Amino acid sequence: MKSWTLLALVTVAVSAGADDKNKDKDKKKEAAAPQAAAAGSADALVREAEAKIAAGDAKSAEDLLRRAAALPAASGDIALRLGRLLDTQLELDAAIDAYTAAAARLTGAARAEALGRLSVAQDLRGMPAAASSAGEAVAADGASAWANVALSRARAREGKGQEALELAQKAEAAGGGAAAAAALGSAQEALGDLAAAEASYRRAQADADQRIVGGLGLGRVLRKTGRAAEAEPLVKGILEQAPGVVEAYKESARVKVALGRAAEAMGDAATASAISENDPDAQRLVQEVTVARGVELLAANRVDEAVQELTRLRDQNPGSALARTGLARALIAKRQPDLALAELQKAVESDPAFAEAHFRTGYVHHVLKRAAAAGLPHLEKAVAADPGNAEYRTQLGAALIDLKQFDRAATELARATSGAGQGRAEGWIYLGAAQLGGKRYKDAVAALRKAAALAADNPQVEAYLAWSYFGLKDSKAFVTHAGRARALGHKEPTLLEYLARVEKGEPIK
């Protein structure tokens, strides 16, 4: 009797347990059903969005992807898709939000892409977080094309051109396409190879998805190579398409400065500073434009006004290397080298990497104080910091000529007269002088003829040409050019003495 009772109790218990398990399964099914439905709904919305994109209806596709991304079961990939679409629509702030959401849900290569794209968008918006996003992208997947694109751009902005170049090449090898081409342009620009950078930016700009990044880079290179008038309509068009792009306002201001319209540039600089998120470059740009306004006053021979305006800027920003260097330029114009050097010394102490401060310091020592040896290290630092600047490299070459380092001077001046420097007569004149000093007379003639084509009736060019032909023992050409130098007011006694002797028939030995 007891055994039957026990068996009955066990049977009841087993039956009850089975019922409980079945109820648990049912509850799990009930809980999973909405999630499965949501996932299915998200997929359906994404498919519908893709159909809208294919039909050219980006706005409807954006709405569908937003709805899909908002569903609880939506994957991070949907947010990434949304970010890509918003990018093409130039809705940068919304794209930044989408990429941030995507990165929080994704891992590996997909996370690296979301963070890489986020970094580029942040960079365009003038957000300092761009660099850290690039670092996170590489940490997620070091082989990702977008991670390397983002980190390459960050390194180029830091002036680390070679590292940026290697990262951009890695991005290209990983299939980075136009985005990698734009990153390559930034790296080449940082290395001073502006011709190569222009080609890379043009390649990037031809792709619809990179028209803003590529176009901005191209505009910058055009400005740096003396073609600001070509850059202006390009940058203006970018601003019309994407009014939230801080980099476009910054470049617009710099283009206007290059065109001699610093007062007009102030509006763009102020806008960039106002809409950026603590972007130090945008804040610095306001000072840049103020300095440019002072330089315009110098060009108009309103030197005292320039000194007053730039002194006020210096007093408002005593720690600014830019402000102090701007004031130094006005003091140089007043022929007050010692006061200028005092400002420049403080500028270099404030920012040891500031190329312009080193250049002006080297210029004062070399030109105003006639101390080429004292100016040389500063000119070398200026060129190292901004290798694509033809003016800096030309001045370095001139100092090397005065120090009788003709071979090195010729090397530097050959680079100064390539690319952006081809149209600068000064570079060709100094290159001719360096070749003349090194007794490479045919090379000197070739350089000086280019100088003469850019600066007609220049007595120094004619004198150098005369000495070059003297070295080649070409009496007829020597007399021609020495005679022109004399007619243009050249007073060097030795040249005039030899001219008189050769005119009387004495051969050149």
Image (cartoon, grey):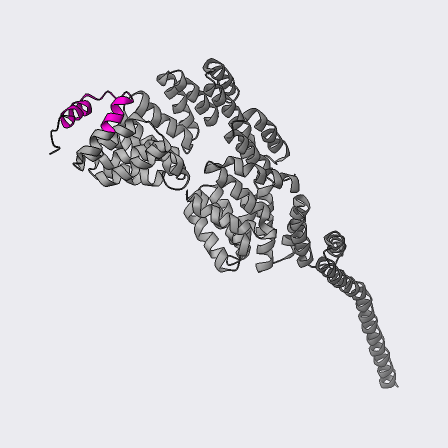
Q: Residue 165: where, in percent of width, then height?
A: 44, 50
Q: How many marks?
A: 0
Rendered position, 333 above or below 244: above
Which residue appears at 80% of the width and 71% of the height? 25
**Image quadrant assignment for residue 353:** top left
From where the camera sits, is residue 279 visible? no
509 vs 291: above or below? below
Residue 215 appears in the figure = yes
Q: Residue at x 60, y 33 (%)?
A: 272
Magenta stretch, residue numbers: 481-503
Could you say which quadrant of the image residue 68 lies in? bottom right
Q: Specify the principal SS of the magenta part.
A: helix
Q: Relative to 367, say whether 20 is above or below.
A: below
- Quadrant housing residue 342: top left
Residue 312: % across, % down: 51, 17
Q: Quadrant of the N terminus?
A: bottom right
Most distant residue in the top direction: 304
Magenta segment includes 497: yes
Say which quadrant the C terminus sits in.
top left
Front-most of residues 374 and 243: 243
Viewer-nearest residue: 372 or 26 = 372
- Residues 457 and 407: in front is 457
Judging depth in this view, the residue of 172 and 150 nearest the camera is 172
For this view, does 61 lie left or right of residue 401? Answer: right
Q: Is residue 153 magenta?
A: no
Residue found at x 53% / y 20%: 316
* Above or below, 13 relative to 405: below
In the displayed structure image, the side of residue 54 where residue 498 appears, left or right:
left
Residue 271 position, x and y percent, is 62, 31
Q: Picture coordinates of residue 43 (x, y %)?
A: 74, 63
